[in-house]
Every structure is written in C-alpha cells, then in structure tokens.
Image (cartoon, grey):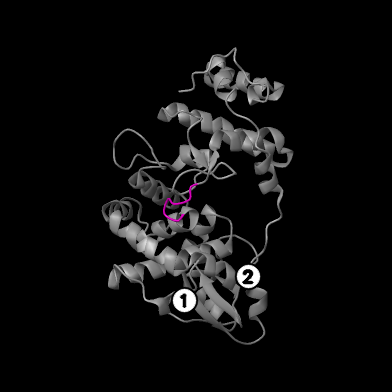
Amino acid sequence: MATRPVGAIPAHSLANRADVQAFIQEMANRHGFDVDYLLTVFSQAEVKPSIISAMSRPGEAKPWYAYRDIFVNSNRIRGGVRFWRANAAALAQAERVYGVPPEIVVAIIGVETQYGGNMGSFRVLEALSTLAFDYPRRAAYFRKELENYLLLTRREGIDPLTPRGSYAGAMGLGQFMPSSFLSYAVDFDGDGHRDIWRNPRDAIGSVAHYFQRHGWRAGEPVAVPARVSGTRYPALISQRLSPPRDSVASLQAQGITPEAPVSGARAAMLLEYQGRDDPEYWLGFDNFYVITRYNHSRLYAMAVYQLGQEIREQHAFYPGTVRPERVARAD
C-alpha cells in the first residue's frame, strides 16, 4: 500500500487540492476510509492533461469496412485462436455457468485489449481523478467511478496506485469500469480474488457474467445477413440502440429476407452497414442488442460478432493456422 508520510505532499499532487480534500472527507464519512491514508494515496497522484486532450478530441466516424479491418483481421483471429486454446477450460466453464459461447468472450477480449496485450498505460487512479476533477462535462460520472475504484481496491486488497488502464479508467483484459467491476467481476478460479488484469480465468468469467446479467440468451443467434428489396425497407433500418421489436415474419413481408434459416416469430432489427462498394444488410436479434450493452455501438457489436465467428471457425478446423483468404487485411 501507499506509504509516503502525509506531511511530505508534493506541491503538484492531487492531495493539495481543496476539491480532492473534500472528496477524501466524503469517502471517510460515507465509507469509513482513513483520511490520512487517502491523503497519502492522492499525494502520489496528479492530473494528466493528456487525458483531458484525449477525452476532448472529436471521434472520427469510420465507415464499417474500415472499422472492420481494424478488428477482424488475421492478427486478431490468430490471437483469438491462441487465447482460446490456452484458456479452453475456463471458456468451457463460462459457457456452462453463464450460457455465453467462447467465441463471444474471446472476441470481446480481443477487441478490447488484443487478448491482454494492450490494457492501457495510465494509472487508473490518475485517469479517474483527472476526469472527476478537471473534466466538468462528465465530472459526476467519473467522480462516482473514482469512488467505486477506491472501494474495489480496498475490497480486493490492491494498492490503488498500481493498476493501469485506459485514459477513461477502464481496466483489465475486458476493460471494465470500476462500477462494472463491482457489479459483474467474479472470482472464477476460487482463489479469493477478482483479478481481471493478470488472471485470464477471472477475466473470462467476468465478461461472461456481464453478458448473462444483461440478458444473453444461450443458444440463440446474434445476427444473420439479409437481402432487401422494394421501397419500404429504408424506413425499417434501426436508428436507435434498443431491443429488437419487429418479428422476422413482419420484416419479410416488407421486403427483407434473411439469408439463413430464422424463426418468423423471432424479434429482429434491420441493420445497415457501409461496405466498400455497396451497403450490407443484417438482421440483429436480442443477443446482438446485448453486445451493444458492453459498448454502445452497432459497429462494435458487429465487429465482435464477426471476429468471434472467424475465431470459432479457425479454432474448430485450423487450430494452429489462419487461412489468408478468410480474413480482412492485417493490422
């Protein structure tokens, strides 16, 4: 744990700020933290302007074909096959316990951190503190995440200065925010700790638990490609991230044809993606919507699904290799 004496507080540290001192007092009053302990912790942390710059930078909206190339490529597919092979028992256990298939869990970890290869370089404490105290637009959200972070480090016996993550404070192989950690992280190997940083078994169980709690339906499809015809389908293209409401049968009656067998009674949404030459159309089902609960993006959800499908096929038939013709361009 942090051990610097309270009296030796650097001038530039967070502990010298009145708003941070007020937060420390709140943590003491609400959760029984020792004030001197938190002063010691925050005396060793400072605001990181690069985090504010990263949060303020406008996002670049990539078309689907460019977004797909980033995540569904030979490097991530090969990495996914290796990760599956190395963690087969944990993935099988997660499917038995939570009903989430291995390829979805593996693809999430692959998209988020390249199977643990890039979990972020920022101290989580400094990322969350910077955004809680110097990013007014979302200060309330990150202040709560900072509170949750201190609670989880105390509960797990972790030095709050040690974990590193993204510039937004996301952590571990699956990039959980602290609130998600407290709600969904699991000790999947029974060692008494929820270690989503260094223990793939805990990370796998935690991702699967998140999906199960958000309504994953075991054994049900995620999405299928579709053909469109006529003039009525444009009005049916999903514009919001909400659960599917239309039945497949009703969509078929309006010129939308699934390219794989699907029950006419199943709820679906029509999805449109920008291909290199022509639009791509898909029907997304309840499990597709569940993936968007992990990251609120249709592009993200489709990338996870397609990466998972590629990994599953390669794992089943070519467990040590990847056929180049089956993948998009490499990173």
Specify the farthest residue to the bottom: 230
Q: Position of residue 257 (x, y in %)?
A: 52, 82
Q: Is residue 296 above or below residue 34?
A: below
Q: What segment is highlighted magenta in the picture?
A: 114-119
Q: Which SS type dominates the magenta stretch?
A: loop
Which quadrant, please, contains the N terminus?
A: top left
Residues at marks 2 and 1, CA–CA distance in whole angstroms: 31 Å
Amino acid type, mark 2: Pro
Determine whether the residue tagged by mark 2 lies in a helix, strand or loop.
loop
- Place residue 109 in its image quadrant: bottom left
- The structure residue drawn at horizontal position 57% and vertical position 30%, both measured from the top left corner, is 147
Q: Which residue is mark 1?
A: 264
Mark 1: amino acid: Gly
Q: Earlier in the sequence, mark 2 or mark 1?
A: 2
233 displayed left or right of 317: right
Q: Position of residue 28 (x, y in %)?
A: 57, 18
Q: Is residue 271 left or right of residue 184?
A: right
